[in-house]
Amino acid sequence: MAQKFPEPKSQLNSEIKYEISQDEEARIQYENEMLAELDARSWISDARREGREEGWKEGWKKGRKEANTAVARKMLAKGYDWDDIIEITSISYKRLRKLALNDGTKGERP
């Protein structure tokens, strides 16, 4: 039966340290368990970091889309040519038409 050892953050008392150091198999088992735990913590840390990066990217994309939509609405209101609006904001024709319909310009090109 495998012997359980304390977590790495906890203090090992001198008797346990001595016992582990004298028993090569126990020492190897303890070291392997500590390495496995460190690996697991590293994987968790990496996953959290990747999640934050992915969340940031998604938020940035959403913010950029909202900003482009706001610019397109202002350009529509001032009567800019649709081709210019599409080129400047990277909004699709379909999306621009929908904005125009919602903003009361009847969704038609000027």
Image (tube, helix red, strand yellow):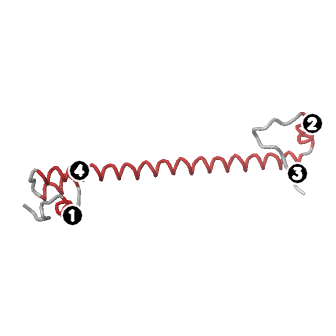
Secondary structure under the numbered disc 4 in the rendered image: helix
* Observer-nearest of 24 and 56: 56
In the rendered structure, which disc, 3 or 4, sits on the residue that comes first in sequence? Answer: 3
Q: Is residue 22 above or below residue 90?
A: above
In the rendered structure, which disc, 4 or 1, sits on the residue that comes first in sequence? Answer: 4
In the rendered structure, which disc, 2 or 4, sits on the residue that comes first in sequence? Answer: 2
- The Cα–Cα distance between marks 3 and 2, rounded to whole angstroms, is 15 Å
Q: Where's residue 35, x and y in %? A: 73, 47
Residue that appears at 82% across and 43% down? 6
Inspect the image, locate mark 3, and give the three-letter code of the amino acid beneath it: Gln
In the rendered structure, which disc, 3 or 1, sits on the residue that comes first in sequence? Answer: 3
- The Cα–Cα distance between marks 1 and 2, rounded to whole angstroms, is 75 Å
Inspect the image, locate mark 2, and give the three-letter code of the amino acid beneath it: Glu
Inspect the image, locate mark 1, and give the three-letter code of the amino acid beneath it: Lys
Task: Please give left or right for residue 60 compared with residue 81 in the image.
Answer: right
Q: Report the residue marked by disc 1.
A: 98
Secondary structure under the numbered disc 1 in the rendered image: helix
Q: Report the residue marked by disc 2.
A: 15
Q: Report the residue marked by disc 4.
A: 70
Q: Where's residue 104, x and y in %? A: 14, 60
Secondary structure under the numbered disc 3 in the rendered image: loop
Q: Report the residue marked by disc 3.
A: 3
* Observer-nearest of 31 and 66: 66
Task: Please report contact status of discs 3 and 1: CB closer than 8 Å, yes or no.
Answer: no
Badge 3: residue crowd in 10 Å (few <14, some 14–19, many ≥20)? few
Frontmost of labels 2 and 4 is: 4
Q: Where's residue 7, x and y in %? A: 78, 43
- The Cα–Cα distance between marks 3 and 1, rounded to whole angstroms, is 67 Å
Q: Is residue 58 above or below residue 7?
A: below
Frontmost of labels 3 and 1 is: 1
Q: Which picture quadrant has residue 98?
A: bottom left
- The Cα–Cα distance between marks 4 and 1, rounded to whole angstroms, is 13 Å
